[in-house]
Amino acid sequence: MFWTVALSVFLKAHRGVIKALLLLLVSGHALADNYLIVTNQRNPIDMISSNEATSIFLGVQRLFASGYEVEIIDHPVNSDIYSNFYRLVTSKSVAQIRSRRASLTFAGVSLPPEVVENDEEVIRWLKKHPNGIGYINENNLDEHIKVLLRVSDKNKNGNLAK
């Protein structure tokens, strides 16, 4: 009986703090980085592995399994989505990605990806490019594009998940 009364008094006295902590826990879960690697609906590829995603976004793999050339659409280098996505998919920092892209460009292997400002522009671009591939926040999924892989920071060690 004593503990019940003590707990009741404690909960009433700290109601605001408890609500704030619960809100923080819930919002922290909602703020987890969850991205979708997406392509045009007409692309014959239905999914890619985490290894393929890493190879594509590092510029190692420049062809889809179908033999078509990969066209990457990207977000601005200074955006949170860019740094978080590349950290999750490639385990590389923004500086390492920029250096790698510069090396590939200088060697004449590839040009840097086209850059758009936000997820809506990525989706709009992908609708016009059948061999395009990009990434968006999972909350912005559009029925006119196809999901190839889900990328989440909820997994330990930066692993990818479908």
Image (cartoon, rainbow, N blue to C red):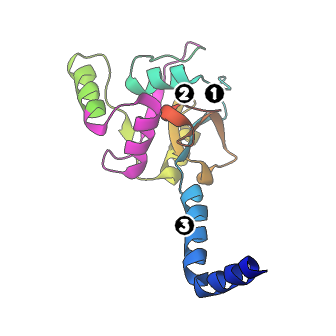
| Front in this rendered view, residue 87 or 144 | 87
- Span of residues in magenta: 66-95
Crowding around mark 2 (Cα neighbors within 10 Å: few <14, some 14 to 19, many 20+) is: many
User: Residue 71 location in percent, x, y?
Assistant: 46, 28
The residue tagged with tag 2: helix, strand or loop? loop
The residue tagged with tag 1: helix, strand or loop? loop
User: Residue 21 location in percent, x, y?
Assistant: 56, 70
Quadrant of the image occupied by residue 65:
top right
* Mark 1, residue position: 43
User: Are the residues flagged by discs 2 and 1 in contact, CB closer than 8 Å?
Assistant: yes
User: Residue 16 location in percent, x, y?
Assistant: 57, 83
Question: What type is the residue that disc 1 sits on?
Answer: Asn
Which sits earlier in the primary sequence, circle 3 or circle 1?
3
Tell me how far mark 3 sits from mark 1, CA to CA. Answer: 40 Å
Give residue 131's mark. 2
Residue at point 63%, 27% (across, down):
43
The outermost residue toward the front is 2
Residue at point 49%, 16% (across, down):
63
As drawn, 134 above or below 56: below
Tell me how far mark 2 sits from mark 3, CA to CA. Answer: 41 Å
* Mark 3, residue position: 24
